Image: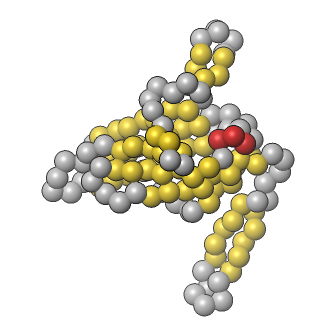
Amino acid sequence: MGPADLYVKTGSSVTLTCVISQGPHDLGTVFWYRGAAIIHQPLALTEQTASSQPQPRVRIDTEWTDQLTSRLHISKARPSDSGNYTCIPTIADPTSVNVHVINGKLYVVYAYSRIKGERNKFGR
């Protein structure tokens, strides 16, 4: 799914992607969790629009091709959306990311590892 921590600015959109490659078996499905709570589709988290139809602020899109791709979309992120998000496939190991929704400016800090010479990107 990517880095262990994801920093986003309040009001921005967030998309978390979980991909399971084809194997010699059924690809199953994917469940998304925020902390210990499963994220159900459809969700009660909605945003009123000009057409006065409630729109889901959080939604899950899943696509089956030669691989299974599940995307968790959060629009107009709020600090209350911060937390640990986990993708749990029925046929593979889970993976998690900590989402931090920050008020104000985001700064990017680069940290260099002296051992491997790798560059890691951290958002703040």
**Please, which colouring scheme is shown?**
secondary structure
Left or right of residue 23: residue 62 = right
Instruction: List x then y, in percent, for residue 38.
Output: 46, 40
Nearest the eye: 79 or 59? 79
- Residue 34 vertical position relative to residue 110 in the rendered view, above or below: above
The residue located at (68%, 52%) in the rendering is 100
Instruction: Say if 3 sits above or below 77 in the image.
Output: below
Q: Residue furthest front?
A: 36
Image position of 56 (left or right of 49): left
Question: Which residue lies at the image location 53% right of the left edge and 45% below the top edge?
Answer: 34
> Where is residue 109 drawn, in percent x and y?
75, 68
| Residue 117 in the image: above or below residue 44 | below
Q: Specify the farthest residue to the left.
A: 24
Residue 52, position as x, y percentages in the image:
64, 9
Q: Is residue 64 above or below residue 47?
A: below
Q: Residue furthest top?
A: 51
Q: Is residue 71 visible?
A: no
Residue 32 occupies quadrant: top left
Query: On the rendered image, what quadrant is the C terminus found in?
Result: bottom right
Count all numbered tags in the image, as a single digit: 0
Residue 104 visible to an observer of this rendering: yes
Q: Residue at x 46, y 25 (%)?
A: 42
Residue beneath the point at 43% across and 50% down: 87
